[in-house]
Image (cartoon, rainbow, N blue to C red):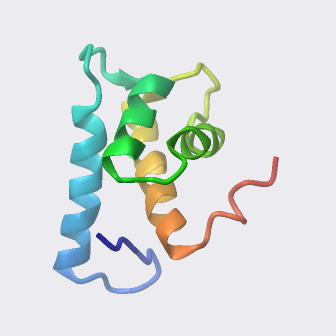
């Protein structure tokens, strides 16, 4: 599966479908249905995406997506997580990880 997404260009429907698929995948990882994703749940998502280093990806995802620093990815932060996943496959994460 190859993922990429460009915010600044017209995006074909097939790519938007992949974006929706990633969103759905991570939403399905919310096993306790509390409306937010723990580190373990995010790691499970990266494992389902066949990441070679799901623990590493999880740490980096939280640096990017956990805007309020509460240790969870909430619904409003979920789009940031999806953006991070897509950026990983496009090779654009360096600019977002300045800390």
Q: Nearer the viewer, residue 73 or 48?
A: 48
Left or right placement of residue 72 versus residue 68 in this view: left
Residue 23, how many percent across, how many down? 28, 48
Residue 25, how many percent across, how many down? 25, 44
Q: Is residue 45 above or below residue 35?
A: below
| Quadrant occupied by the N terminus | bottom left
Q: Is residue 83 above or below residue 89?
A: above
Q: Quadrant of residue 55?
A: top right
Q: Quadrant of residue 5?
A: bottom left
Left or right placement of residue 74 versus residue 34 in this view: right
Which residue lies at the image location 68% right of the left edge and 58% below the top edge?
A: 96
Left or right placement of residue 79 versus residue 63 in this view: left
**Residue furthest to the front:** 52
Which residue lies at the image location 31% right of the left edge and 45% below the top edge?
A: 48
Which residue lies at the image location 72% right of the left edge and 65% below the top edge?
A: 95
Which residue lies at the image location 44% right of the left edge and 78% below the top edge?
A: 6
**Residue furthest to the right:** 99
Q: Nearer the viewer, residue 41 or 55?
A: 55
Residue 79, how many percent across, how many down? 41, 48
Residue 89, how many percent across, how many down? 48, 69
Q: Is residue 93 above or below residue 65?
A: below
């Amino acid at each position: 599966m190859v993922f990429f997404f460009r915010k600044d260009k017209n995006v074909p429907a097939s790519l938007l479908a992949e974006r929706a698929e990633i969103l759905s995948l991570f939403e399905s990882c919310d096993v306790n249905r509390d409306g937010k994703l723990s580190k373990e749940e995010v790691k499970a998502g990266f494992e389902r995406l066949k990441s070679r280093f799901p623990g590493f990806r999880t740490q980096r995802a939280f640096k990017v997506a956990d805007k309020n620093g509460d240790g969870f990815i909430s619904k409003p932060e979920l789009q940031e997580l999806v953006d991070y996943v897509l950026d990983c496959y496009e090779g654009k994460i360096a600019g977002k990880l300045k800390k």
